[in-house]
Amino acid sequence: MKLNAQALSASKILAASLLAATLHVALARSADAQQFSADLVARRDETTTAVGRLYVSDKKARIEAATFSDGFFLIDTAGPTAYFVRPRAHVFMDAKQSSPLTRIFVPVDLADPCRQWLPMAQLSAPTGLATWRCQHDGEETVAGQTMDIYRVATAGSAFLGWIDRERRFPVRIRTEDGTVITADHIRDEPQMEQTFEIPAGLRKFDPQALIRRIQHSDVWVAPPDSD
């Protein structure tokens, strides 16, 4: 009986240790992977406009912009990639300059948010380091949360970004014309993996490939020489 009791006690200790290790891993993953959703709202001159919906999980974001009702944007800073997905048309494509939201509302590194903003800007259009400026511009407490403010400027555009330290995400942006876009009604909640995935069966649309096919077809008429 004594041996059985010792074996049972050892088994309980092992089970408790395994449970503690599992909880530790789960808590570590939870701390690393911030997951939330929010409403994107723009305000300027006392006018409020619904911009869209935002979903975030770790290094990924999904933006459902009001101006693109036939699709949504998928962003992954680990790539980095930014796609515009149109499920009903069965296609997806590089976001490029479709929306400035894909260059701004992205998960960032608290130590250096510029490391995420620059690659996303370069996905949109050629962005040289000579014209890129990104620097810390102070702190501000908003709704009880301490936020880091960053000033970003490049050729043709500039903005201020307020980064939520807890969520590691810019939750307020002020553009050059004074428009303030904020992530309102933030809901800290688990996000489904499928939310950030391109649906199965979609093909990638390549506009350059389409142009090349047209150029090699019978309908193509070369433009006249300028000379």
Image (cartoon, rainbow, N blue to C red):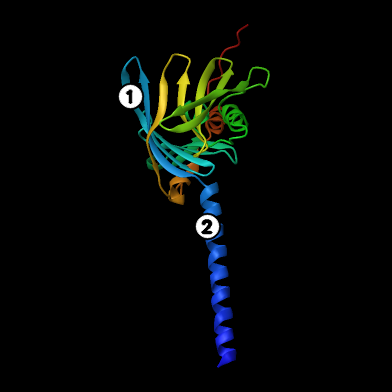
- Residue at 52%, 47% (x, y): give it: 33
Q: Nearer the viewer, mark 2 or mark 1?
A: 2
Q: Nearer the viewer, residue 88 or 155?
A: 155
| Cα distance between the residues tagged 2 and 1 | 38 Å
Q: Nearer the viewer, residue 50 or 1?
A: 1
Residue extending farthest to the right is: 130
Task: Give, as a three-letter code, the residue at label 2.
Answer: Ala
| Residue 132 point in image, percent of width and height | 63, 20
Residue 49: which numbered mark, if any?
1
Provide the secondary structure element on which disc 2 rests: helix
- Residue 71 lies in what quarter of the image? top left
User: Residue 184, image x and y in percent?
Assistant: 37, 32
Q: Residue 2: x, y in percent? A: 58, 91
Residue corresponding to mark 2: 26
Residue at left offset 41%, top offset 18%: 179
Question: Observer-nearest residue: 138 or 203?
Answer: 138
